[in-house]
């Protein structure tokens, strides 16, 4: 699955509907400090089902709703992630060229998840991404400062991190288990 577009509305610093295109290849998001770059990462994590407010860098769920004054106050926050379907998804989604995952939060506190405009459970989102490596906690999303921390680690710690990333650590655990028996 490849990200085609991320649409954000009423979420954090985005009072207007924005559509961020991600064409094939490398995309970079640049901007001055405080302009909302990390908020875009938060939007991506949030739509993938992140539950931890700390990881979303807010104190309460309400802080996810746009709170500035632009002469407007969106009634809800919505993030839509448009993915190109390359087939590595559960059977029922296989025929669809595009998969749109969305999450909404209303000022009332109610929230919902949607797959292709149909309300679903968070569980369905997890199921959709099962075995694809797409996961709000996965190593696919690397936070600000993480690269610096990585460089400061010892060679052993770096190796451990890379093995986790490559999925080798599970095999190593199996090997050690076998060696002991
Ligand atoms: P840096 O380069 O310093 O990492 P950044 O581009 O990553 O900056 P963000 O952390 O994404 O910046 O954005 C921070 C901005 O988002 C702040 O100005 C903050 O006021 C604004 N912001 C966060 N939550 C909301 C909200 N609920 N409503 C309005 N603005 C918000
Ligand atoms: Mg940032």
Image: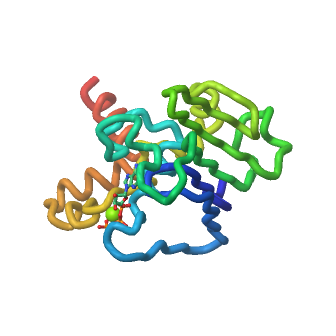
Left or right: residue 41 versus residue 127 is left
Q: Tell me where residue 47 sits by quadrant.
A: top right
Q: Nearer the viewer, residue 42 or 22?
A: 42
Quadrant the C terminus occupies: top left
Can you see residue 166? Answer: no
Left or right: residue 62 versus residue 95 is left
Residue 82 x %, y %: 68, 53
Residue occupying image coordinates x 61% and y 62%: 18
Residue occupying image coordinates x 73% and y 46%: 99
Q: Nearer the viewer, residue 151 or 111?
A: 111
Residue 87 x %, y %: 75, 48
Direction front: furthest residue: 71
Position of 36 relative to 87 (above/below): below
Can you see residue 71? Answer: yes
Q: For ligand 2, which image quadrant applies? A: bottom left
Q: Tell me where residue 96 sits by quadrant.
A: top right
Position of 117 relative to 4 (above/below): above
Q: Nearer the viewer, residue 22 or 77?
A: 77
Residue occupying image coordinates x 31% and y 72%: 33
Residue 141 x %, y %: 42, 54
Position of 137 relative to 29 (above/below): above
């Amino acid at each position: 699955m490849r990200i085609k577009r991320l649409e954000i509305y009423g979420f954090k610093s985005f009072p207007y509907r924005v559509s961020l295109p991600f064409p094939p290849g490398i995309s970079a998001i640049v901007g001055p400090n405080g302009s909302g770059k990390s908020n875009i990462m938060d939007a991506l994590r949030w739509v993938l089902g992140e539950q931890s407010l700390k990881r979303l860098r807010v104190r309460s769920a309400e802080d996810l709703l746009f709170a500035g004054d632009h002469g407007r106050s969106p009634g809800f926050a919505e993030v839509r992630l448009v993915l190109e379907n390359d087939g590595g998804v559960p059977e029922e989604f296989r025929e669809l060229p595009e998969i749109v995952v969305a999450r909404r939060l209303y000022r009332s506190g109610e929230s919902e998840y949607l797959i292709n405009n149909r309300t679903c459970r968070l569980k369905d989102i997890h199921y959709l991404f099962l075995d694809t490596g797409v996961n709000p906690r996965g190593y696919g999303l690397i936070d600000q400062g993480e690269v610096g921390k990585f460089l400061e680690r010892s060679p052993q710690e770096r190796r451990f991190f890379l093995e986790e990333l490559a999925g080798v650590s599970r095999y190593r655990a199996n090997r050690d288990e076998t060696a002991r028996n």
